[in-house]
Amino acid sequence: MREYGLMIKVAELYYYKRQSQRAIAESLRLSVPTVSRILNEALEAGLITVKIVDIDQKSSDLNARLKDRFPIKEALLVNTPSSPSGDILKKLLGKAAWEHVVGELSPGSVLGIGPGSTMHEFVEAIDPGNPLPGITLAPLMGGWGYGGLAYEVNRLVSAAAASLHCEFNLMPCPALVSSEDLRKALMKEPLIEEISRLWDSVNVAVFSLGGEVEQGNYPQLRMDASALPAAKASGAVGDLLGRFIDAEGNLLSIDVNNRMMSIPLDKLMAVPLRVGVGGGRNKIKVLHAALRAGLINVLVSDTMTCETILEMED
């Protein structure tokens, strides 16, 4: 049997550092079969214990803990993919969100939709063979003029409406305007005012949350070199429909929030079902903040993200 130090080292690299057996072999100048034998010896020596976890039970337990800790109606959890690619997780989250939301819609419902790549997967999950002609779709904020146009909210709304064969509205203005005065003036424009009145009738709002400020995708803010650093300096942990929030879920009193053409927080909070979608390392802080403040009352996320959120709360 190998010495304990070597077995512990190999086990740490394989199970904690998530390195492949080939990478471990190269770093320790061993053969891959030798690394495999060392792991087996560590198991036999009792240095490694194996616990089989029932994923469904794990999700059920997490769901109960989340509902006990935060003011939410439901937590819909997907198993965190082993692949480091965020695209797989977004597909899983988008599909889970749609499967829940479609059950909440009925003729006369108004569904509000936010932008983003995860919401793109939400729209992609819609089955065109099951139309919902009696509902209306509404964007929850203005559009992006460049950058990430595949995930722009007006495009997502029109694509969703084409699959559902339902009525829809577009928001004919930028998500971010140059001043607070301009935002106030635009909100009084008859066409935009008509859309904003529709926000009062939204039954279900579904949106992803923007993650860490330095890692997030904010197409229009990239033109303003000071906006993102100012948000970060003010304590922003992410954004909700374009508006930055702090770790307690409070809207920050910063210039960029006052220039955002999106549903006001009081109108959002009046929506009966507020479905927040997001997962992965850079969404942990913003999801935690939104949960603590009750900004969302249905969470769609993954097990690892939610375990970390509960650890933070503890």
Image: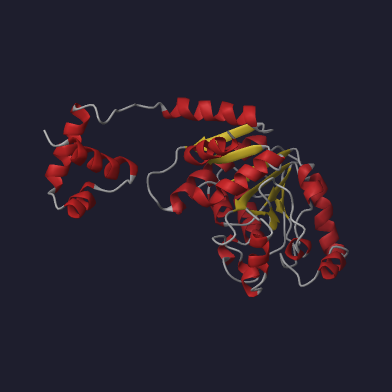
- Asked if one can make out residue 249 in the rendered structure from this viewpoint, the answer is yes
Does residue 59 appear left or right of residue 240 in this picture?
Answer: left
Q: Position of residue 294 (x, y in %)?
A: 71, 39
- Quarter of the image with the N terminus in it: top left
Q: Does residue 128 appear anywhere in the picture?
A: no
Depth check: give the residue in front, 303 or 212. Answer: 212
Number of marks in picture: 0
The coloring applied to the image is secondary structure
Q: Quadrant of residue 235?
A: bottom right
User: Residue 112's spot in the image, x, y percent?
Assistant: 71, 49
- Give the image location of residue 178, x and y in percent: 76, 72
80 or 169, which lies in front? Answer: 80
Please tell me whether residue 44 is drawn above or below residue 259 in the rendered image: above
Residue at the location (61% across, 45% down)? 287
Q: State left or right for residue 248 relative to residue 23.
A: right
Question: Left or right: where does residue 266 sit relative to residue 137?
Answer: right
In this view of the protein, which residue sits in the foreground, 174 or 284? Answer: 284
Quadrant containing the C terminus is top right
Which residue corresponds to the image point at 57% horizontal and 60% vertical from the top-left?
216
The residue at 68%/65% (across/down) is 230
Quadrant of the image occupied by residue 196? bottom right
Horizontal side of residue 53 vs 61, given as left or right: left
Above or below, 309 relative to 174: above
Q: Is residue 210 above or below residue 276?
A: below
Q: Is residue 3 above or below residue 251?
A: above
Please state the horizontal and vertical placement of residue 74, each as a whole percent of the image.
62, 32
